[in-house]
Image (spheres, rainbow, N blue to C red):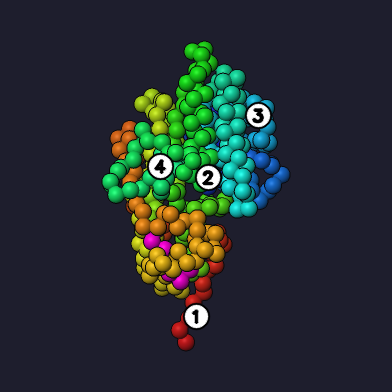
Amino acid sequence: MAAANDSPLVLVTSASGFIATHIIKQLQENSYKVRGVVPNLEDEEKVKHLHNLCPEANVKLELVQADTSKSEAWDEPVKDAQYVIHVISPFPKNNSKDDNELVQPAVDETLAVLKACIAAKSVKRVLMTSSTAAILSHSDAGGDNKVYNEDDWSDPTKLDPYGKCKTLAEKAAWEYIKELSDEEKIELTVINPSYVMGPVLPGTRCFSSEVVKVLLERDIPVVPKLNFSIVDVRDVAAAHVKAMTMEEAVGKRFIVNASEMWMKDIAQVLLKEFKSQGYNVPTMNCPNFVLQLRSLYDKTVKKFLPQVGKVLKLDNTRMKETLQITPRENKETIIDMAYSLIEGGFIKKIFLKSAP
């Protein structure tokens, strides 16, 4: 890596997010200059931790404020950046009935970032954080044991708002890049992570921590027969950092996934590690008929009911061969996430009574 003053400037959107914080940390560890986009610099609780992601960094993290709902807001953050990692994505509101409240902002913001990158003239490559939801959905699972790869695309009409958002935003990005003139061309690479777990860095929140949280806090007495394609957030961050400068990554999608795991097996890992610490983790599978009955009045159960018993298989060959990433074992990922949630106060710490 070049000296700190000569190192490329990387812009990271949604800088305070779960994935973005790990990307920033690894970029700084690799001596890149990093500029992060946050919605409000005065929100001390959401920005102060970002300056401590890599205390030994050669160059201090630069933070800029931007109202990302406005297309012109991206011009200043993108200025002088050589690489842009676009992680931002609206998250579905539980009370929202209109998919467009999530989908259209994601598409608009993605296109606004790309347009700002082209106008800046300094940007060489854009990396976009999509999802395996843009590759397949649980409605695709059948009895043919199909293994999905980067050539596959989800049908947006079969997806929930989050999956639809990721799929349509990614498609819009590829289509936009394809139509650019030779003078305007910039490089695009897309990272498609599966269910991202792993340590939550201080000051950040993570929606995918819910599985670990409900099990450790025993919010449910039995475990639904759900299967997750899991990847460690540290491997996702590494995929972004590596793909950013590799010529072989230009114009490609990368599935970033470790392996599949049943929720019951996740529970077993947690029980073995945390039982001695006072956590009573449920490990018995819930009968399907119970879930079907509960789905009649429980919207959360109704939402995941179509996923019960289904396994989606992903091909991570490109990740391993091109990016040279060997993913962490799911056990390590799950345990590290659990400890970070306990230490961060997201899961109540149990204090066992000492023997008399």
Q: Is residue 296 left or right of residue 39?
A: left
Which residue type does callout 4 highlight? Leu
Residue occupied by mark 3: 71
State which mark lies toward you, 1 or 2: 2
Residue occupied by mark 4: 136
Which residue type does callout 3 highlight? Ser
Proximity of marks 1 and 3: CB atoms separated by less than 8 Å:
no
Tag 2 or tag 1, which sits nearer the N-term? 2
Q: How far is disc 3 from disc 2 in space, using C-alphas?
A: 22 Å
Tag 3 or tag 4, which sits nearer the N-term? 3
Magenta stretch bounds: 220-226
Which residue type does callout 2 highlight? Tyr
Residue 50 on image: x %, y %: 59, 45
Secondary structure, mark 4, is: loop
Q: Nearer the viewer, residue 249 or 32?
A: 249
Q: How far is disc 4 from disc 3 in space, using C-alphas?
A: 30 Å
Secondary structure, mark 3, is: helix
Q: Which mark is residue 353?
A: 1
Tag 2 or tag 3, which sits nearer the N-term? 3
Quadrant of the image containing the N terminus: top left
Proximity of marks 3 and 2: CB atoms separated by less than 8 Å:
no
Pick out the residue farthest to the bottom: 356
Q: Which mark is residue 162?
A: 2
Which residue type does callout 1 highlight? Lys
Q: How far is disc 1 from disc 2 in space, using C-alphas?
A: 43 Å
Tag 4 or tag 1, which sits nearer the N-term? 4
